[in-house]
Image (cartoon, rainbow, N blue to C red):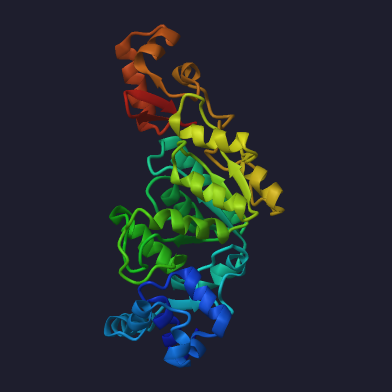
């Protein structure tokens, strides 16, 4: 949308009025058409659609200041406000039950027109889960699927990095205002996405991180994509909210299995029991979506890499988390020998240290 168009002011005024939620705005649009039609109607007619307090707020000074602030924000390079009336509005979001009337965007708006896959998972990811998410996302991005995720720590951040490394790039859907960097640790990643991918938010500028907003934004992560891949998730993970939203929206749901002993595998296993497609390689997802596989069928690091010389201690470790005492018993070695080997393997990137004194093989 051209940001000097008078129509943008009307959209902003409607969406920035306190008490007017997205569903109420959509109902007003259904009744009146474009926002300027609604705002031009006599107050007596508007009073039949809005409570007095909301009607007063609609033309208040605070709303006028918020509108002007948003218009100034939209004038900056690579900043865009996309409304339901715009050709750039994502077509897939029009299919969901509650599309946002307005989106704030920074970056490559054309990514909204391209095929996409959501990749989500735990904030407290394991080293293996992080590697899997990044390598899977890179394989999908190389096949020109745009990776959609939520800019959280852990799996989300890894998925964005993988998306940026491939041709498809990435879209980060925020649970805050688009000008708020949350979590702060991902601010450099957000800056890179703004430059080479796309940041997207339905929330007004300046909206801080609030617990109720993140589950709400999850419907957009799934809604923008043709499918949703969950890499690691506990049973109470927000990623399962995204997966359920994807299923409700008619999207494909995929899950990467893991160790039966890992709490971060239980959410994925639950999804698989409920009908999600089990994923061992990038090809599993590509085939289901009808997308050509770019490069090798298996995303690097997405599972056991055969052909790599086996270390004796790695053979005894397997791929489940294990402690030193168990390794000593399996390998028949003293604790000092096992500790030395584990340190060497960790420095070589073959083993990761987990909380609770556990170790996990990475490849």
Instruction: Out of 63 and 169, give the one closest to the viewer.
Output: 63
Instruction: Out of 296 and 277, give the one closest to the viewer.
Output: 277
Instruction: Out of 78 and 340, give the one closest to the viewer.
Output: 78
Q: Residue at x 45, y 61 (%)?
A: 173
Q: Is residue 318 above or below residue 212?
A: above
The picture quadrant where one finds residue 66 is bottom left
Residue 260 in sight in this render: yes
The picture quadrant where one finds residue 206 is bottom left
Residue 2 in sight in this render: no
Q: Position of residue 341 (x, y in %)?
A: 36, 20
Q: Is residue 101 above or below residue 271?
A: below
Q: Position of residue 309 (x, y in %)?
A: 52, 25
Q: Residue at x 48, y 92 (%)?
A: 41
51 left or right of 181? right
299 left or right of 162? right
Instruction: Out of 25 and 138, give the one closest to the viewer.
Output: 25
The picture quadrant where one finds residue 65 is bottom left
Q: Is residue 99 above or below residue 219?
A: below
Picture mark count? 0
Q: Residue at x 44, y 86 (%)?
A: 10
Q: Position of residue 214 (x, y in %)?
A: 41, 55
Q: Residue at x 32, y 81 (%)?
A: 63
């Amino acid at each position: 949308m051209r940001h000097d168009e008078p129509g943008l002011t009307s959209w902003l005024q409607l969406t920035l009025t306190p008490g007017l939620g997205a569903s109420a705005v959509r109902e007003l649009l259904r009744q009146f058409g474009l926002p300027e039609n609604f705002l031009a109607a006599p107050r007596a007619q508007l009073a039949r659609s809005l409570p007095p307090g909301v009607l007063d707020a609609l033309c208040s000074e605070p709303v006028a200041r918020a509108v002007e602030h948003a218009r100034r924000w939209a004038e900056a390079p690579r900043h865009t406000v996309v409304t339901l009336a715009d050709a750039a509005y994502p077509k897939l979001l029009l299919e969901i039950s509650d599309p946002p009337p307005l989106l704030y965007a920074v970056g490559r708006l054309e990514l909204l027109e391209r095929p996409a896959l959501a990749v989500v998972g735990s904030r407290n990811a394991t080293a293996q889960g992080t590697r899997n998410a990044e390598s899977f996302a890179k394989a999908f991005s190389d096949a020109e699927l745009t990776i959609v995720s939520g800019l959280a720590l852990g799996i989300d951040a890894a998925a964005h990095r993988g998306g940026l490394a491939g041709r498809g790039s990435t879209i980060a859907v925020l649970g805050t205002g688009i000008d708020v960097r949350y979590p702060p640790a991902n601010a450099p990643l957000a800056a890179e996405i703004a430059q080479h991918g796309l940041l997207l938010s339905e929330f007004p500028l300046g909206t801080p991180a609030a617990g109720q907003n993140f589950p709400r934004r999850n419907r957009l992560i799934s809604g923008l994509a043709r499918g949703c891949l969950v890499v690691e998730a506990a049973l109470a993970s927000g990623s399962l909210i995204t997966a359920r939203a994807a299923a409700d929206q008619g999207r494909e749901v995929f899950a990467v299995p893991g160790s039966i002993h890992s709490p971060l595998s239980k959410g994925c296993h639950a999804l698989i029991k409920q009908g999600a497609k089990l994923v061992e390689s990038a090809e599993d997802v590509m085939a289901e979506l009808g997308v050509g596989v770019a490069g090798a069928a298996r995303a690097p690091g997405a599972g056991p890499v055969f052909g790599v010389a086996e270390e004796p201690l790695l053979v005894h470790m397997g791929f489940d988390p294990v402690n030193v005492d168990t390794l000593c018993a399996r390998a028949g070695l003293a604790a000092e020998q096992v500790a030395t080997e584990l340190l060497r393997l960790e420095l070589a990137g073959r083993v990761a240290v987990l909380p609770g004194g556990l170790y996990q093989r990475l490849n």
